[in-house]
Amino acid sequence: MAFGAGGGSPDEVKGDINVTPLVDVCLVLLIIFMVVTPMLQSGVDVLLPQGPHSAKKPGKEGDLIISIKQDGTVFIGQDWIPDRDLVRYLKAERAKNPARAVMIKADKRINFGKVRTVMKAANDAEFTGVSFLTENQQAGAEIAKGRT
């Protein structure tokens, strides 16, 4: 007479849950989110100035986003552009799509002279629609009060 560890006959269905496939699927999803999340960001992280009259991001999907970091480096999208190549790069971007607008994301801790240089480069490249991205200072206060 043979004894089985689980008791019952070998043809009997076991009621145990195998969690290994669930863990595998969760790890794959975690890896996918870790890879995709950095790609969702447009431009470079900067600390935007706050303004009372800020609106939701204007413009269209294909607008050109110029980011100016605290150290004065200029990025167009995710690409670092040296100051000497900025006008040439902007002219090439305008040649691709003349109706494209420019959005400037400037760190609030930088000297305005650097922003002026970028604005002049956009003007030299003959862009007509240039705007600044800011954060709405009232939105933070409303969230803190519990209003959304």
Image: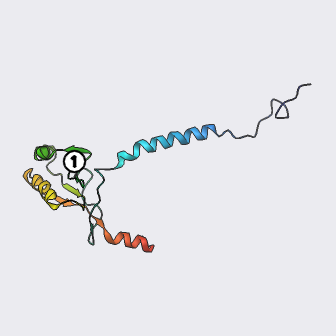
Left or right, 64 with reference to 14 = left
Res 84 seen here: yes
Q: Residue, x 31% and y 68% (percent of image)?
A: 136
Examine the image and state in which quarter residue 35 appears.
Answer: top left
Under mark 1, the amino acid is Ile
Q: Quadrant of the N terminus?
A: top right
Please name whichever residue, 141 or 108, is drawn nearer the observer in this view of the structure.
108
Task: Name the residue beneath numbered marker 1.
Answer: 76
Left or right, 26 with reference to 34 = right
| Furthest residue toward left | 124
The picture places residue 148, in percent across and down from the top left corner, at 42, 70
- When the figure is inspected, residue 74 is found, relative to residue 25, above or below; the finding is below
The image shows a total of numbered marks equal to 1
| Furthest residue toward front | 71
Q: Residue, x 13% and y 49% (percent of image)?
A: 98
Badge 1: residue crowd in 10 Å (few <14, some 14–19, many ≥20): many
Examine the image and state in which quarter residue 117 appears.
Answer: bottom left
- When the figure is inspected, residue 57 is found, relative to residue 44, above or below; the finding is below
Left or right, 126 with reference to 73 = left
The picture places residue 119, in percent across and down from the top left corner, at 13, 56
Q: Residue, x 9% and y 55% (percent of image)?
A: 120
The picture places residue 101, in percent across and down from the top left corner, at 18, 54
Please name whichever residue, 109 or 61, is drawn nearer the observer in this view of the structure.
109
| Furthest residue toward top | 1
Q: Residue, x 14% and y 54% (percent of image)?
A: 118
Q: Secondary structure at mark 1?
A: strand
Res 129 seen here: no
| Furthest residue toward right | 1
